[in-house]
Image (cartoon, helix red, strand yellow):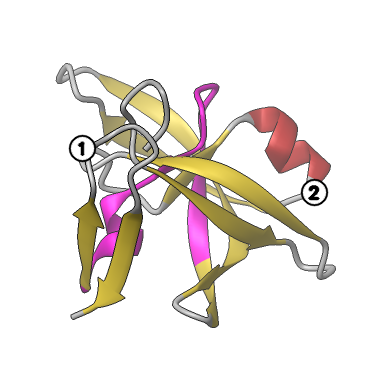
């Protein structure tokens, strides 16, 4: 848990050339995608564009997102995922958490645990 009372998790993102970057993500249970990253990180990692998709936001509005592909280290294994380009802090969504238990100690500096179901 960070000072803003957000559950956070570092995530290793890898591009097609094997370049890796550790990204500090905020867990967003209202985000149904895998991961969102700002354009600066997508550009730095030179992630390949995959598609565009219309996404419904939390307020019910719809917007168009560009999707990129990358590989993350998840549960000790490489996993290819889609990354939504969004100019917010990096968000880890429910598509990546699906099939896992999320446990958060909701206190300042509290731990975040994720385990396979």
- Judge whether 74 appears above or below 42 on screen: below
Q: Which residue is mark 2?
A: 46
The tag on residue 115 is: none
Between residue 24 and residue 89, name the one nearer to us.
24
Q: Quadrant of the C terminus?
A: bottom left
Between residue 44 and residue 7, name the one nearer to us.
7
Q: Mark 2: few, some, or many residues within 10 Å (few <14, many ≥20)? A: some
In the image, which residues are magenta? 81-99
Alpha-carbon span between mark 2 and mark 1? 27 Å
Observer-side mark, 2 or 1, equals 1
Residue 95 x %, y %: 30, 59
The residue shown at (73%, 30%) is 40
SS type, badge 1: loop
The residue shown at (35%, 61%) is 96
Q: Which residue is mark 1?
A: 30
- Judge whether 84 appears above or below 86 on screen: below
SS type, badge 2: loop
Residue 9 x %, y %: 46, 50
Residue 39 x %, y %: 66, 30
For marks 2 and 1, the one nearer the N-term is: 1
- Judge whether 56 appears above or below 31 on screen: above
């Amino acid at each position: 848990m960070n000072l803003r009372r957000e559950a956070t998790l570092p995530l290793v993102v890898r591009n097609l050339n094997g370049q890796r970057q550790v990204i500090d993500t905020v867990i967003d249970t209202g985000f149904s995608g895998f991961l969102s990253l700002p354009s600066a990180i997508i550009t730095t990692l030179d992630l390949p564009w995959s598609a565009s998709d219309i996404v419904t936001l939390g307020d019910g509005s719809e917007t168009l997102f560009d999707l990129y592909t990358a590989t993350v280290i998840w549960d000790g294994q490489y996993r290819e995922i889609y990354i939504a380009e969004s100019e917010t802090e990096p968000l880890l969504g429910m598509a990546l958490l699906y099939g896992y238990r999320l446990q958060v100690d909701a206190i300042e500096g509290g731990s975040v645990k994720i385990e396979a179901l």
